[in-house]
Amino acid sequence: MGKIMKILSMLAVVAAFGLSSFSVSSEEIKQTVSVGYASSSAGFAGYELDDVADGFNAKYRIEYTGEYGLILSYTKTDYSEGGIYNGTRANVSLEYSSFMAGPTFRANEYFSVYLLVGGVNGKASASVSSVSATESETGLSYGGGLQINVTPSFSIDGSYEYVELNEVDVGTWVVGVGYSF
């Protein structure tokens, strides 16, 4: 994990514990844990890559008041392919991981929106025969999403996050389900 990711992780933990020290009764605090499917697509120099990287997302949302709260998000996707092309063995792999945090706003008992900002690490590896190369980049990402409370304890989550790592643009869609308590 890069230096930026470590700093952002520490800041998010400090913010979460700092916000939890506010004087709020436990009846007012609402928490939601959600997990879901993540799909990253990448573009390089204006060209969209055909394949997508699949993975997962996990989120933790805490509401301190009826309207405002904090959300933490972790996303991990990867893609790999290998084969023999013209008699030569070739492999390629792409990895993407992000840790993000941001404010939440509850519009009503059913809809909650949120913004995200955080760190991303992207890694690309390729090998052809006995020659291989690996490159890793860390960057600042941003995004947003919506959580819909179908019942008081069950929610549906959807979000999008975006980052530019040098000349590579990565967009990640997430859809998941959550449990509120």
Image: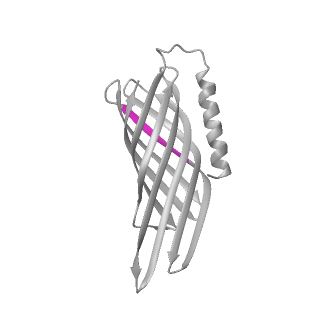
- Magenta run includes residue 132: no
52 or 127, which is in the foreground? 127
**Residue visible at 68% across and 50% down?**
3
**Residue visible at 50% across and 44% down?**
74
Q: Report x, y in % for residue 121.
A: 57, 54
**Which image quadrant for residue 135?**
bottom right
Residue 45 seen anywhere in this rendered image of the structure: no
- Magenta run includes residue 145: yes
**Residue visible at 64% across and 32% down?**
14
Q: Report x, y in % for residue 38.
A: 41, 50
Q: Report x, y in % for residue 159.
A: 44, 43
Q: Main secondary structure of the magenta part?
A: strand
Please indicate whether residue 137 sits to the left or right of residue 88 in the image: right
Residue 116 seen anywhere in this rendered image of the structure: yes
Residue farthest toward the front in the current orientation of the protein: 130
User: What's the magenta region?
Assistant: 142-148
113 or 41, which is in the foreground? 41
13 lies above or below 41: above
Please state, as top left, top right, bottom left or bottom right, where the C terminus lies in the image: top left
**Residue visible at 40% across and 67% down?**
50
11 lies above or below 46: above
166 or 38, which is in the foreground? 38
Residue farthest toward the bottom in the current orientation of the protein: 86
151 lies above or below 116: above
Q: Report x, y in % for residue 33.
A: 43, 33
